[in-house]
Every structure is written in structure tokens, then in C-alpha cells.
Amino acid sequence: SQQGEEDPQALSIQEGENATMNCSYKTSINNLQWYRQNSGRGLVHLILIRSNEREKHSGRLRVTLDTSKKSSSLLITASRAADTASYFCATDESGANNLFFGTGTRLTVIP
Amino acid sequence: GAGVSQSPRYKVAKRGQDVALRCDPISGHVSLFWYQQALGQGPEFLTYFQNEAQLDKSGLPSDRFFAERPEGSVSTLKIQRTQQEDSAVYLCASSLEGRLVNQPQHFGDGTRLSIL
């Protein structure tokens, strides 16, 4: 079963605006990862944040992690039409062999 | 190739038929994962290989599902006596190291399976 839940389920913004997506999870984790999935394609790894990290940046992406609240957020700044995709958080839990994915946020960036 | 390759991209089968889905991971990657993704949902874990050893098959939904990776590279996911509820996208992913923390997974584009 899926461990994470993304919020919102869908988000529509204008090009140039910022997009924020949130993820909540239930158990202790080693790290949390964010992936992007374009329609009909596989998932692409965006960023990994370890459980002892609170914030991480990669280009236009900013990820935060609050282990006390079991939540993470992904911020995409200055969005582009090419950012249109589904975004998933995935948790890497101690003792598990796999990632647990959330239900995803469908982002639409309007040119 | 540079990435994870899956074939076929699309598979249509009649209920009751057997199907085989292939995954070519990134060369040299030790870990290989299979996931099932239903429409509008995130991927759900099926099974995990470290080289040729299947270390975890806890996500396989029934004994109709079988996976192998005999030489530690290419993997095949086989579904016997397919049912309509097997319709989904099957994703394969690989990662460089054995099951260690803090590494990303690299995904193929998946096989979209439709059972009529």
C-alpha cells in the first residue's frame, strides 16, 4: 500500500509562478525522494533529502523535510510549461527493500 | 543503452493468457525493482533483485506473478492466467548499489498491459 499522500492532488498555475506540493508520510524514514512523471513515461528522480537534512536545493527546486511532522514540501520556482507533469514523493524506510510512493500531484503550467 | 529499457511498451492480452514483460536495467546496476502503477496512482512495489537473487517478492499480488533475473542483468516479469485486474503499467527500476540507503532509482518507461 502507498505510504505517502501528496497535497494538492492537482495544481494549475501560470508560467512564471511558483508551485508548492506537500507530502505526508506515516513511518520513520532513511530519506525522502521526489520524482517527476510525464504522461506515458517512467519516473525521473529529482532530488533526495536525507532524514537528518531539513532543506535541499537543486536548480529551481527546493525541498524541505520535517521529520517531527512527517512531512515534506517541493517548491518549483519560476515554473515553465515543460514542468507540467505528475510529481510523487517516495519514502525510503528502514528495513524495507523498496520505495513507498505517494498518490502524486498533477501539475499543469499554463503558458 | 543509457537508461532502463522495457519491452514491449504496450501489451494487449485476452483474459487467461500468459504474458512476459522484459526489463533491461542500466549496465552494471546491482539492484532491480518491479512496480505496478494503476491509473492515477503512484507505483506500488512488486519485487526486488540484488544481482540474480530475488531478495523480496512480498509485493507480488498472487502466485500468478513470477519474476526472474537469471544472470543478474535482464529481468522478466511473467503473469500467468491474466485477469482484468492485472491491467496496469508495469515499471522496472534499477539502482547502482545493493540495497543501501540514500540512492535514487532509475525507471524505464514501463509496459502498459491491458487485459480484455
Image: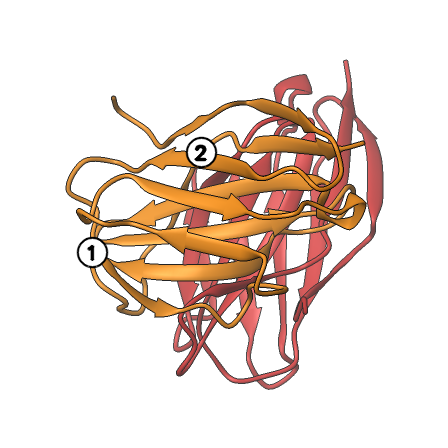
Report the front residue among B51 and A20: B51
Residue at 66 percent across and 33 percent down: it is B113
Mark 2 and mark 1 lie on one chain; the one further toward the N terminus is: 1
The C terminus of chain B: image quadrant: top right
What is the three-letter code of the residue carrying label 2? Answer: Gly
- Element type at mark 2: loop
Residue in the picture at 49% in, 45% down: B78
Residue A77: assigned label: none
Residue B83 position (above or below residue A78): below
What is the chain letter for disc 1?
A: B
Of the residues shown, which amino acid type is indicated by label 1?
Answer: Asn
Image coords of residue B115 (percent x, y)? 75, 35
Kindly indicate the quadrant of the structure image that contains residue A22. bottom right
Q: Which residue is mark 1?
A: B51
- Circles 2 and 1: CB distance less than 8 Å? no
Query: x, y (%) of residue B76?
Result: 39, 42
Image quadrant where residue B50 sits: bottom left
How has the structure been colored for display?
Answer: by chain
Question: Residue A19: x percent and y percent?
Answer: 71, 41
Q: Which chain is orange?
A: B
Quadrant including the N terminus of chain B: top left
Q: Secondary structure at mark 1?
A: loop
Give chain A's shade. Answer: red
Q: Which residue is mark 2?
A: B108
The chain to which mark 2 is attached is: B
Mark 2 crowdedness (10 Å alpha carbons): few <14, some 14-19, many ≥20: many
Q: Report the front residue among B61 and A107.
A: B61
